[in-house]
Image: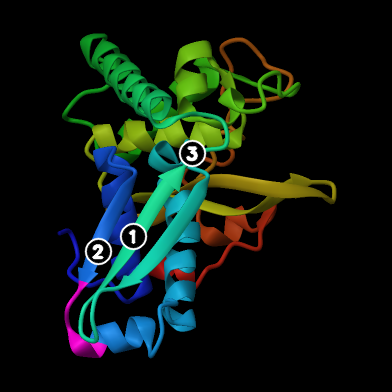
């Protein structure tokens, strides 16, 4: 088990990520420690409200941090079973309103494969090299995202446009799709500390929910908005680097209301 008897938000995050990465969609978690069993279930069958909140907070966190895995999984369900006075089981389940489990698995693996192929092409063309530092690699990938994709202003497919599979397959999507593919590319390039951040963003007072990237590039924590690198309407071959590898102060000009305390963890 990835985490024995998860209780804290961070522990549930690791459990949820494990479920998403391994394509199992549901997991039974045994609780045999009397202290934790009592804490989870109290005197009845229902999960303790504090622990329930931790699980829900973890679910909200992982959807932002790991869009490449959770963009297909929109629903979290859970059940509890009291086996005895000292043993209990928590069952966690994922599903989607739009796809069955086989479709989700297929799309996720196609996303990974197509992204790997793209990275291989960039390496073969010497656009990416092992001599590059993190920021140089991240800039190459940022430009690739902008030049090779088009923001879907029409939301032609309200499902596919929101995930990385749609972007890497059809070269069109919205911010969640851009961030999903970009974050996956950064990780494949060897940049380990990468996560999505959900907040609001906009120009001229026109604010909306938005997701972008925060990454550790050569020891510096920086924000990167790969969506804003691609102008609307699309300009062939052009990339806007205004929101590439910027600090929190610069980002705050047009990006707001993300949970800064949460993303310090």
Residue at the spot 52% in from the left edge and 68% down from the top edge: 260
Q: Secondary structure at mark 1?
A: strand
> Mark 1 near mark 2, Cβ–Cβ under 8 Å?
yes
Q: Quadrant of residue 48?
A: bottom left
- Check residue 224 in the rendering and tell me which mark sits there, or answer none: none
Q: Secondary structure at mark 3?
A: loop
Q: Position of residue 41 (x, y in %)?
A: 37, 82
Q: Earlier in the sequence, mark 1 or mark 2?
A: 2
Q: Position of residue 149 (x, y in %)?
A: 55, 17
Quarter that holds the N terminus: bottom left
Q: Specify the segment rendered in magenta.
A: 31-35
Question: Residue 147 vs residue 255: left or right?
Answer: left
Residue 95 lies within the magenta run: no
Find disc 2 in the rendering and name its residue.
29
Find disc 1 in the rendering and name its residue.
91
Task: Work out whether residue 180 or residue 203 is closer to the camera in this orientation and state it.
Answer: 180
Find disc 3 in the rendering and name its residue.
71
Is residue 157 depicted above or below 53 in this figure?
Answer: above
> Mark 3 near mark 1, Cβ–Cβ under 8 Å?
no
């Amino acid at each position: 088990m990835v985490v024995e008897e998860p209780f804290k938000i961070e522990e549930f995050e690791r459990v949820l990520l494990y479920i998403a990465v391994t394509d199992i969609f549901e997991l039974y978690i045994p609780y045999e420690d009397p202290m934790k069993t009592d804490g989870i279930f109290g005197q009845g069958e229902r999960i303790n409200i504090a622990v329930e909140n931790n699980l829900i907070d973890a679910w909200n966190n992982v959807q932002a941090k790991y869009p490449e895995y959770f963009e297909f999984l929109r629903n979290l369900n859970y059940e509890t079973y009291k086996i005895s006075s000292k043993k209990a089981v928590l069952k966690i389940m994922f599903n989607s309103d739009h796809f069955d489990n086989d479709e989700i698995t297929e799309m996720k693996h196609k996303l990974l494969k197509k992204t790997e192929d793209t990275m291989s092409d960039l390496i073969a063309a010497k656009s990416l090299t092992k001599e590059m530092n993190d920021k140089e690699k991240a800039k190459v990938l940022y430009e690739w995202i902008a030049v090779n994709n088009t923001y879907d202003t029409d939301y032609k497919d309200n499902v596919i446009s929101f995930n990385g599979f749609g972007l890497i397959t059809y070269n069109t999507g919205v911010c969640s799709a851009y961030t999903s593919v970009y974050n996956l590319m950064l990780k494949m390039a060897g940049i380990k500390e990468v996560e999505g951040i959900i907040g609001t963003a906009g120009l001229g007072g026109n604010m909306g929910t938005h997701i972008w990237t925060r990454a550790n590039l050569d020891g510096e924590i920086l924000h990167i908005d790969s969506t804003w690198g691609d102008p609307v309407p699309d300009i062939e071959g052009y990339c806007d680097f205004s929101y590439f590898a910027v600090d929190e102060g610069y980002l705050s000009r047009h990006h707001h209301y993300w949970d800064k305390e949460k993303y310090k963890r």
